[in-house]
Image (tube, rainbow, N blue to C red):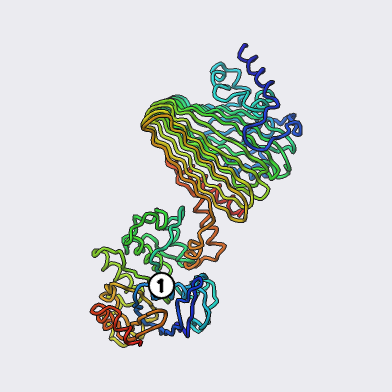
């Protein structure tokens, strides 16, 4: 379980999160909505432990451990993983080697994983060097597949992806979160739910991802606070219809 | 005879002549008399210590996957052998008795360049002549080791490397000092001849002691359709190293590529350049340098000059400053005709924190992430190298990386 309590965060001299409360229980997937600049990416980066996001109040508890001050790699070791929107290029590091790094001690068939997300041809290229938007997303997914974390943070996993690859990416994310079409066959809904252990927090603008990944809850982040919680489909429909205006009204 | 007199005169005149770059060295501090060391009948006779030192610079005493070997210990050539038809490996002192070798000796390098070239002429100890005969494909590398074992010695060598017409030759030279060497001087003149449609790769790995002074002097020439790959790796501490290898492309379509990987440790001064002159149509040149200063001083020079329309040349220098230190990148382009295509990029900085955090979020500690990025920074794809040689360079880099980082 992930529990965020009264989280306040500064980036430089700007306060970007102003008291965020959020709880993701085991097996739950949440969607994080919000206009540009509302602090969504900052929340994810803070959860992952990026030091430039300075926690000034509140705490983050993951699997019962207070991780508020824990360094990035220890969070990864505890089972957190993130798909970045714009990851850096690392010259001289082959994608293949990064996937092995992600796998850690785990024995993973890199080629087989890569072919699942159409990345086999990229394994011997420098990580993210000259990758298109869609290729970056697939590369991020491939890394997470090898890393196999328990809490997955996705920062706009479908942005820049062409229509052809949307389904591929959507289904891969669903599989990572144990909600793929294959993981539900034959089991009743209750059992299906009980079997799920993975947690997810997904930032989306387009909402396409909702067509592939059944989500449990939606949250709207607005000006550094959670302004609205509810059914993710309903929230998305409202935002599609009238933007974030209703959230603003709701808050005031 | 006149020729010899001329060289002797030049050497005499240049005896005190300082080099254009690098700190000046008092040559008298280093003795030129080496103990005479008996030749070996096989590399199996090397001591375990010598073997392991040589291996650090890519010289493998088992000679597995090698086409030939040359080993010089201090002033003596102790082993020279070719394991392949079409390949000659000779100590230069023996080779100079042959007329054809004299056609190449000091033909590119200038005795009078500075006090170091002068010394290599007047006090020549030995060195190697490696030649692939016309049409020969010497795909496994020839290995050469210039091993300095005696403390405070000035080791003076002269090498001649010739890839004859339509041949392919790969040479890996390891320069190493013994575990007990505190100080010493290595002066090495090398002349490279890449003939018509020949391909030569020359990889030099330096693994010196901390107190060593090193002054290589290299000049090359590439004829029509020839390819010259010149790779240089120096990642171990060394007191002072200065070199500025130059190559002229004189035949249509000739190509030269220089790659260097440098690490400057505290107390080390590296001044390493590369110069390629594009003097024929359709020639191409590339100089790529990766420099990491770990507290030392590095000057990375590059000079490309072209005087024929349509030539293409690129220079790239990337520097990383890790624990203080100093990197000066001096890229120079000299276009002397309309229609030359020349470019350069130079960047000096620190490791991007985002890259470290990215790797940490995949489970690596900060130190592991830094090492991974540094390894990546130093891993340059060198097109045209046989995979086996590429692996050897990677292994040498990884081994040094582990040892020094």
- Image x and y of residue A56, in percent: 53, 79
Q: Is residue A157 left or right of residue B385?
A: left
Residue B253, by quadrant, is: top left
Direction from residue A13 to residue A237 in the image, left or right: left
Q: Is residue B302 above or below residue A49?
A: above
State whether residue B367 is above or below residue B168: below
Tag 1, which secondary structure? helix
Q: Residue B394: image x %, image y %?
A: 51, 48
Image vertical order of residue B290 relative to residue B164, above or below: below
> Is A171 in front, or is B211?
B211
Task: Count every numbered label the image shows and give the total.
Answer: 1
Q: Looking at the image, which residue is at 24% across and 63% down?
A: A164
Question: Does residue B125 appear in the picture of this structure?
Answer: no
- Toward the viewer: A142 or B85? A142
Report which residue position mark 1 lands on: A41
Q: Chain of mark 1?
A: A
User: Where the C terminus of chain B falls, by quadrant?
Assistant: bottom right
């Amino acid at each position: 379980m992930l529990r965020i309590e009264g989280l306040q965060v500064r980036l430089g001299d700007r306060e970007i999160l102003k008291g965020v409360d959020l709880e993701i229980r085991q097996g739950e997937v949440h969607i994080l909505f919000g206009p540009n600049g509302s602090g969504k990416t900052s929340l994810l980066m803070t959860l992952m432990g990026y030091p430039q996001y300075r926690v000034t109040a509140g705490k983050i508890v993951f699997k019962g451990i207070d991780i508020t001050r824990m360094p990035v790699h220890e969070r990864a070791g505890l089972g957190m993983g993130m798909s970045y929107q714009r990851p850096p290029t690392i010259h001289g590091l082959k994608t293949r080697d990064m996937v092995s790094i992600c796998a850690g001690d785990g024995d993973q068939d890199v080629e087989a994983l890569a072919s699942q997300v159409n990345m086999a041809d990229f394994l011997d290229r420098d990580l993210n060097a000259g990758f298109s938007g869609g290729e970056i997303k697939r590369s991020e997914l491939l890394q997470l597949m090898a890393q196999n974390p328990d809490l997955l943070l996705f920062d706009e996993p479908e942005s820049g992806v062409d229509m052809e690859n949307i389904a591929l990416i959507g289904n891969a994310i669903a599989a990572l979160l144990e909600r793929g079409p294959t993981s539900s066959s034959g089991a009743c809904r209750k059992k299906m739910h009980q079997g799920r252990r993975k947690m997810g927090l997904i930032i989306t603008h387009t909402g396409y991802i909702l067509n592939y990944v059944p989500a449990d809850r939606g949250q709207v982040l607005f000006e550094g606070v959670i302004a609205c919680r509810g059914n993710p489909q309903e929230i998305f429909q409202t935002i599609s219809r009238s933007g974030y205006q209703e959230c603003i009204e709701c808050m005031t | 005879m006149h020729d010899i007199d001329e060289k002797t005169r030049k050497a005499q005149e240049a005896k005190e002549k300082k080099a254009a770059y690098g700190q000046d060295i008092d040559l008298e501090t280093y003795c030129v008399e080496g103990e005479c060391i008996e030749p070996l009948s096989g590399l199996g006779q090397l001591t375990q210590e010598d073997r392991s030192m040589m291996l650090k610079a890519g010289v493998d005493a088992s000679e597995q996957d090698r086409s030939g070997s040359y080993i010089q210990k201090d002033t003596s050539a102790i082993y020279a052998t070719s394991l392949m038809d079409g390949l000659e490996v000779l100590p230069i002192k023996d080779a100079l008795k042959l007329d054809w070798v004299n056609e190449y000796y000091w033909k590119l390098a200038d005795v009078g360049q500075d006090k170091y070239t002068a010394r290599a002429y007047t006090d020549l100890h030995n060195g190697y002549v490696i030649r692939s005969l016309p049409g020969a494909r010497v795909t496994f590398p020839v290995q050469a080791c210039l091993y300095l074992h005696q403390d405070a010695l000035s080791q003076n060598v002269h090498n001649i490397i010739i890839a004859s017409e339509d041949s392919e030759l790969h040479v890996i030279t390891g320069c190493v000092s013994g575990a007990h060497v505190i100080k010493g001087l290595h002066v090495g003149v090398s002349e490279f001849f890449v003939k018509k449609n020949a391909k030569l790769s020359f990889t030099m790995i330096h693994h010196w002691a901390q107190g060593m002074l090193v002054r290589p002097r290299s000049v090359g020439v590439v004829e029509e359709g020839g390819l010259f790959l010149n790779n240089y790796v120096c990642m171990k501490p060394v007191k002072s190293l200065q070199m500025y290898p130059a190559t002229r492309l004189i035949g249509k379509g000739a190509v030269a590529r220089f790659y260097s990987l440098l690490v400057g440790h505290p107390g080390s001064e590296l001044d390493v350049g590369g110069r390629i002159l594009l003097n024929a149509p359709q020639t191409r040149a590339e100089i790529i340098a990766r420099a990491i200063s770990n507290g030392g001083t590095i000057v990375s020079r590059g000079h490309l000059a072209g005087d024929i329309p349509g030539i293409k040349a690129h220079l790239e220098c990337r520097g990383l400053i890790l624990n203080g230190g100093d990197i000066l990148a001096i890229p120079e382009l000299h276009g002397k005709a309309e229609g030359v295509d020349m470019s350069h990029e130079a960047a000096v900085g620190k490791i991007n924190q985002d890259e470290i955090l990215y790797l940490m979020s995949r489970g690596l500690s900060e130190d592991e992430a830094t090492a991974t990025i540094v390894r990546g920074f130093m891993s340059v794809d060198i097109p045209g190298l046989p995979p086996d040689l590429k692996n050897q360079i990677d292994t040498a880099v990884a081994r040094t990386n582990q040892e020094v980082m």
